[in-house]
Image (cartoon, coloured by chain):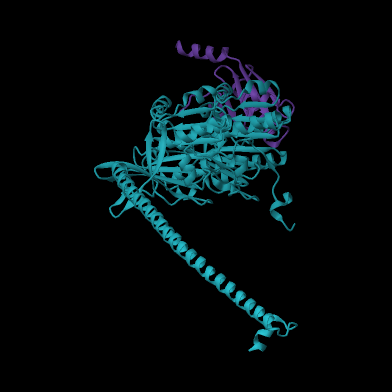
Amino acid sequence: MSANPAAANNTGAEVFLLRLYVAGQTPKSLIAFANLKKICEEHLAGRYQLEVVDLLEKPQLAQGDQILAIPTLVRKLPEPVRKIIGDLSDTERVLIGLDLRPQK
Amino acid sequence: MSRPKQNPRTQLPKVPTGIQGLDEITGGGLPQGRPTLVCGGAGCGKTLLAMEFLVRGAIEFDEPGVFMAFEENVQDLTQNVASLGFDLKDLIERKKLVLDFVYIERSEIEETGEYDLEGLFIRLAYAIDKIGAKRVVLDTIESLFAGLPNPLILRAELRRLFRWLKEKGVTAIITGERGEETLTRQGLEEYVSDCVIMLDHRVNEQVSSRRLRVVKYRGSTHGTNEYPFLIDESGFSVLPVTSLGLLQSASRDRIATGVAALDAMLGGSGYYLGSSVLVSGTAGTGKSSLAAHFVEAACRRGERAIYFAFEESSNQIMRNMRSIGIDLQPWVDKGLLQFQANRPTLFGLEMHLATMHKAVKDFKPQVVVVDPLNSFVIGGNESEVKTMLMRLVDFLKMNQVTAFFTNLTSGGDVLEKTDVSISSLIDTWLLLRDIEIGGERNRGIYVLKSRGMAHSNQIREFLLTDHGVELRDVYVGPGGVLTGSARLAQEAQENAAQTARKQEMEYRKFELERKRKALEVQIAAMRAEFEILEAETLKIVGQEQARETQLSQERVDMGVSRKANIAARPARSKGGAK
């Protein structure tokens, strides 16, 4: 009985700081953004911040977060930093990447 | 167009790398505005080659560069190349160089669908545009395959990347690890097909050597051999084997050997300037002594000399040479003579060659001694030693340096053979040999060959005296060549014979003189006799004439007295009267 509130407390206290790197309004970027939005609303409602960075406008930011692949979703918080690449269409893997599902 | 080799339009535009030797092999550098693949095993110098390409470009050709590292971070990279004299920090501050470390950790990355490498493109483009880079290095881009999932996407993206680099017009070096059967593990050669350079690092008999080969260079001629290269404190340098052809100028000037009698054997004036001289012989025949003579003579003329010793230390050489009256110390003190004493096993052949190159370039000697050559032969590397020596000979000839090599022939070997079979590279070959006769071992010297000069065909006895090397004529008799005390005996014998002959001659001269005198006496006697005869004869003739005159006078007188025809001429009247 004591484990449950603790776990809830744990996840509840954490704010997810997410940053999605894209390069222009490409179909892949749009799909990724839509997928991300959906997942966040379903699993992180009210406790996430989402920032979209367009590298075509701010190329200098690519080096800082070690961005190679586009689109890349970076979980800045909670630590450790995680990276998820691709258009986020595989919801299951996105949840694993964000540490919202225990890995099997 | 009639001479396409000299027409630059038929060749690709090239970008000089600034790396010593590489531009010679590639005929001017890497293809401009195209990617070049540099592949090789671990630790063979790919990163360094690439980095030097950028650094030289930035410093010497004013072409800024971007180094994108996938394996080493910026700090490690800066430290690693600092040992080669590259100050990356300074170049970065002066906006000549951008270092970008791409960090990929597979475990931190989750793939959730389709992706592309646009981020990499943007980063690269940003770095290139920031400093106006003309050169780009991607080291080692294959790391992407380990770091990112879905190789199919990666391959497509790499193909796009190389195309994009070409469109950007940057000259790029892509490095890749050598694969099992392919040039690179991921088959990058499939995408980068303009120029492929392979580096190799092999160890033979505990001595390592590095090689470079231009596997492919589309649209350009290039040297196809494996060229040794080395990495030292001044960076990367490739040593082209004699690919450059035989273009050395041949001097007609001569250079004294330091031994007057040897000069005489070589057409009277010694070696040709800038030629290569080999002295071979068995142990203890005086090879180093000849070398010391040569060096000393050069220093005496005010020339510079380098003595590369591979078996003795400089002190030992100087002490030993002092025993035959050659003092090299003053020349060392004056800075005309430099000793470079190293063990051959200190490092590989290429490194030896490079240190020699460097020493010659720095010291600018007119004379170089390498003593001995065959100490380089370790195990079965004769052919490598030969190519190294060929390069050394060529290099020295190019610089008009007269080279003096010694070679130790081991006891049972054929004398007219060197361990490293470089005889064909040698212009003047002197052979020192032991002559064992009459319980003695003496030294003989002869000129086996000397290109371009009328040289002696004589074997001379070679003496090491306390005032240096002396050459003596030897005697060739039915029992072979006479040397040492046998020669002395022969000389004594010859002297005695000569004295006897001389005495005989004196005697004959004297005899002749005596005969002449006897003859002269005889002639004088005969002449006296003749003179008496002559005098008597004249006297008789005179008397006869007187009597005849008197007779005719008497007739005239008689006519007068008889009152004969007075008018008649007295001479005719005589006949008429009868």
Q: Quadrant of residue B465?
A: top left
**A32 w.r.t. B478: above or below:** above
Position of residue A31 in the picture relative to residue B231 (left or right): right
**Nearer to us in this view, B533 or B459:** B533
Q: Which chain is purple?
A: A
Chain B: colour as depicted: cyan
Quadrant including the C terminus of chain B: bottom right
x, y percentage for residue B429? 45, 46
Q: Which residue corresponds to the image point at 72% horizontal and 39% vertical from the top-left?
A: B169
B391 and A99: which is toward the camera:
B391
Q: What's the residue at 45%, 59% (across, down)?
A: B524
Relative image position of residue B271 (x, y in whole percent):
52, 43
Residue A69 x, y percent position in the rendering: 62, 32
The quadrant of the picture occupied by the N terminus of chain B is bottom right
Q: In the figure, is residue B232 to the left or right of B171?
A: left
Q: Is residue A103 left or right of residue B123?
A: left
Q: Residue at x 73, y 85 (%)?
A: B565
Residue A70 visible from this viewpoint: no
> In this view of the protein, which residue sits in the foreground, B314 or A49?
B314
Q: How many marks?
A: 0
List x then y, in percent, for residue B268: 52, 45
Residue B167 seen anywhere in this rendered image of the structure? yes
Residue B319: quadrant of the picture: top left
**Would you say B356 lies left or right of B218 here?**
left
Say which residue appears at 38% left-offset and 50% top-offset. B416
